[in-house]
Amino acid sequence: MTLEPREYRTSSATLTVVRPDLLEIRYDPGTIFNLQNVGEVQMKRRELMANRPYMTLTIIPEDVDYSLDSTHTDQGKPDRGEGRLLASAIVARASMIQMLTKLYFSYFPQLHRILVTDDELAARAWLDQQIREIASTGS
């Protein structure tokens, strides 16, 4: 049985369930990261992946902008204690967004493994490595 990727839209991103354990999130060019847009994507992510363990690959294009309200709210709080989100690789093409993403995670540390990079191939390889390590160690 072959599973085909399923795509879903929010107002600022396309979410694709690539495999039962991998969700890709691609933000639209020109998106403004604000509390509403980021919150909508996070809600859709939780809805799509439900109760199974999974990883995310998030692609943020170079021409996105941000609102400070998106950096002052812990969007990952509902995931803590559930252990479903295993690893997240964030590919940020703009250095400012990379820096803000790293700063966000320093303010709101997550329980799962995180990589922030500008290299999509490296992010994919890192996720493959994480799933192998998790499968062999159980955590």
Image (tube, grey):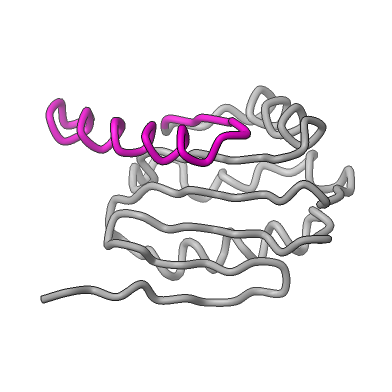
Give the extent of the magenta segment: 113-139
Question: In this rendering, is residue 77 above or below 45?
Answer: above
Question: In this rendering, is residue 7 above or below 13?
Answer: below
Pinpoint residue 64: horizontal percent, then vertical percent: 81, 52
In magenta stretch: residue 77 = no
Magenta highlight: main SS: helix
Question: In this rendering, is residue 97 above or below 33?
Answer: above
Pinpoint residue 48: horizontal percent, then vertical percent: 42, 69
Q: Locate residue 19 relative to residue 56 in the image: left or right.
A: left
Pinpoint residue 41: horizontal percent, then vertical percent: 62, 63
In magenta stretch: residue 120 = yes
Quarter of the figure with residue 34: bottom right
Query: Residue at image x 52%, y 67%?
Result: 15
Quarter of the figure with residue 43: bottom right
Query: Residue at image x 86%, y 50%?
Result: 65
Nearest the eye: 56 or 123: 123
Quarter of the figure with residue 32: bottom right
The quadrant the C terminus occupies is top left
The quadrant the N terminus occupies is bottom left
Query: Residue at image x 85%, y 48%?
Result: 66
Pinpoint residue 121: horizontal percent, then vertical percent: 46, 39
Query: Residue at image x 20%, y 33%?
Result: 132
Outermost residue, top side: 106
